[in-house]
DNA sequence: TGTTAGCACTCCATTTAATCGAGTGCTAAC
DNA sequence: GTTAGCACTCGATTAAATGGAGTGCTAACA
């Protein structure tokens, strides 16, 4: 048996209807719902076929049909029309916070949760090419010195160092020059032992400071690697009865508490080809999810890019019967806007 | 009617038992539970009295008794024995992250959630005396300059500034001197218009850079004022059936999503006297909570101090029948440890 | 006067039975 | 190939029956 056009239309009608109501869909409903002008009996026959093919199931004998994962998959792959979404104020969110990345992400993920009414998450962008751009050491007071480290993509980190003996201004200037001539533009992997010892030699009696700074650089990099994940709208799961029962809710809320695992979930698979906005969007339906705790959810992920090789992932989590058209549309639009704002900086 | 010793003992027994089981406790249970050697009939009489006095109620006619808010309040005020807690690894958490305040708070709140099995929250410390300690402007590349601002308490902030025309090294040095002589040690409120215009005059043709930096300072301060709240262990509410039903859970999870409101809840009332650890701990039982959404919860808050006037609040949220002894003990111990680590820095 | 045994009573929780209705599959006619 | 008709299924909802934990009250006792 194969999928002909009429079956597809019926399947589509079932899914559309189920997305809206969350109730199993009966043959009579479809008969009226579509412009096919077929009686419920005919629909029933077709539905039996669709069930046999694995696109829909009955929760129990005398109920209507609901889509299976395979049914949703078919819908998403061949029938979905990702509509560009409005996303009115998002541009403000993105612009407003440009220089406080963290705040921007928090705002963004919150905005998305509010807009879509699903739970949302976003990973802080991680630097692809981990290059140092600039290192600076300054005196804060007698015994504390501040190391500021700027990486490619304008990721800024600081670290306060305790230093035994004071350093005079001139030496400080020299140390800074030493640091920058050696480290600027350097990829993190290239900083090796011989380099470090060379620098120490040059620093002479202040070699301990240099090694402090280099330690700081190392830590800062490491810090950047266990990536931050921000979430919002977890309370939205209570909007969908199929997720709101104690069992499910508890599991999901727990999952959202474990940012680290969430991160893995998001970064696990990005291997989609293509450039520019509108690509890198993936849909995971129910059992397709890597995590057991998400087995009753669908997750839509999108990679985003802030220029300079800064890449992260956005995830939207809802029930299986999530409004795929809207969510994918929203993410596409968002990608476009991000590209508008950050893309042109690249030149 | 008044509270005599026997009534207090019975009330205590009722509460202790209810804290453990979560089930209404009957007269027979108490008769066996305590060392009073009284028959259940006698206990029944006393319980009727306690009910009349408002310390306990029956959920329905033929059920045992459960404590009222007033009952818990009496317990907390007069019978609780806050036991010092073990808190094995917390010292590691506190030390390990000393220079990344944010990470430390996140770890801490997570640790507490795991230890207590309740939901936890913590506000980032806000600076009491908002003094600038150090300001530095450095060149990152041709058109971007980095302003680093260090405040009393070693709160470090950076901001990237776009600058039209390049500035040579010497000028940069001068600007930095200007900034520091004028701003260092200055309280934020003291920076007024006349000061700003004076600095601008001195900066001459680079006055726009100065005003950029001052703007940055302003923003950074403002940023610090809408205080961050970190939460953890919200999934713990599902451990307590009385909070885990859909209605309650949804409301609570929503409350925890609204960090801003949570913040108000925590900072609303601190007006407790006393110095040093072991003070500033407050217990809000059920309806005593300011927020309607917490009406079925108890909240224990504690202020903490990191030295240098850096103060924040910790909150632990659980069911009414929370283990007050343990929670208060935990917070006291934590305060002591924090004092050990950060307290002596003050000298 | 305080304590206790005994007993009737209440009310929730749980189980069991009864009813309803949406939706199906199948058959036979068009 | 389509459709009307009908018997059938099965979850959901409502109603009734049962059991038991715990009470309040009374009367007897120290």
Image (spheres, coloured by chain):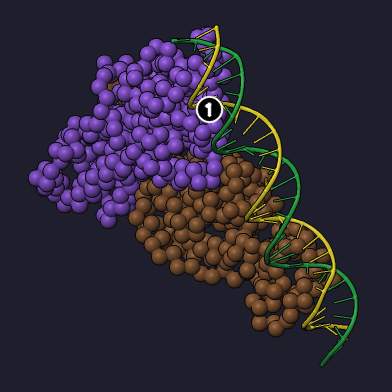
Chain colours: A purple, B brown, C yellow, D green
Q: B328 or D27: which is nearer to us?
A: D27
A196 vs A157, left or right, is: left
Q: Which residue is mark 1?
A: A64
Q: Nearer the viewer, residue A172 or A79?
A: A79
**Looking at this view, is B271 or D27 the one in front?**
D27
- Residue at image x 36%, y 52%? B97
Quarter where residue A54 is shown? top left
Compared to residue D22, the image places residue A44 above or below, namely above
Quadrant of the snapshot with the N terminus of chain B = bottom right
Query: How many other residues sit within 10 Å of disc 1, few (<14), some (14-19) or many (≥20)?
Result: many
Q: Position of residue A203 (x, y in %)?
A: 15, 46
Instruction: Please state the horizontal and vertical placement of residue B200, each as a whole percent of the image.
Output: 44, 25
**Left or right: residue B160 compared with residue B169:** right
Q: Is residue A307 visible?
A: yes
Disc 1 secondary structure class: loop
Query: Residue A185 location in percent, x, y?
Result: 19, 31
């Amino acid at each position: 048996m194969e999928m002909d056009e009429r079956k597809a239309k019926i399947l589509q009608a079932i899914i559309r209807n189920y997305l809206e109501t969350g109730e199993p869909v009966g043959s009579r409903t479809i008969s009226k719902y579509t412009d096919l002008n077929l009686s419920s009996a005919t629909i029933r026959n077709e539905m039996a076929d669709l069930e046999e093919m694995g696109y829909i199931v009955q929760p129990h004998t005398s109920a209507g049909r609901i889509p299976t994962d395979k049914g949703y998959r078919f819908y998403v792959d061949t029938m979905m029309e990702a509509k560009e979404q409005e996303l009115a104020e998002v541009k403000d969110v993105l612009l407003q916070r440009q220089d406080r990345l963290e705040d921007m992400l928090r705002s963004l993920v919150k905005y998305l949760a509010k807009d879509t009414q699903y739970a949302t998450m976003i990973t802080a962008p991680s630097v692809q090419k981990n290059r140092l751009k600039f290192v600076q050491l300054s005196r804060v007071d007698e015994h504390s010195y501040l190391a500021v480290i700027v990486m490619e993509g304008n990721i800024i980190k600081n670290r306060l160092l305790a230093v035994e003996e004071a350093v005079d201004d001139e030496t400080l200037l020299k140390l800074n020059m030493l640091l920058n001539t050696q480290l600027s533009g350097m990829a993190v992997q290239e900083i090796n032992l011989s380099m470090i010892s060379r620098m120490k030699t040059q620093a002479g009696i202040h070699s301990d400071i240099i090694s402090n700074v280099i330690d700081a650089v190392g830590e800062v990099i490491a810090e950047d690697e266990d990536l931050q994940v921000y979430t919002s709208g977890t309370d939205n799961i209570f909007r969908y009865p199929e997720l709101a029962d104690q069992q499910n809710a508890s599991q999901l809320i727990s999952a959202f508490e474990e940012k680290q695992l969430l991160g893995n979930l998001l970064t696990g698979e990005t291997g989609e080809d293509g450039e520019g906005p509108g690509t890198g969007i993936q849909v995971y339906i129910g059992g397709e999810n890597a995590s057991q705790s998400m087995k009753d959810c669908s997750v839509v992920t999108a990679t985003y890019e802030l220029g300079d090789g800064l890449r992260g992932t956005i995830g939207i989590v809802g029930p299986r019967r999530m409004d795929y058209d809207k969510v994918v549309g929203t993410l596409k639009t968002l990608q476009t806007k991000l590209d508008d704002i950050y893309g042109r900086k690249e030149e």
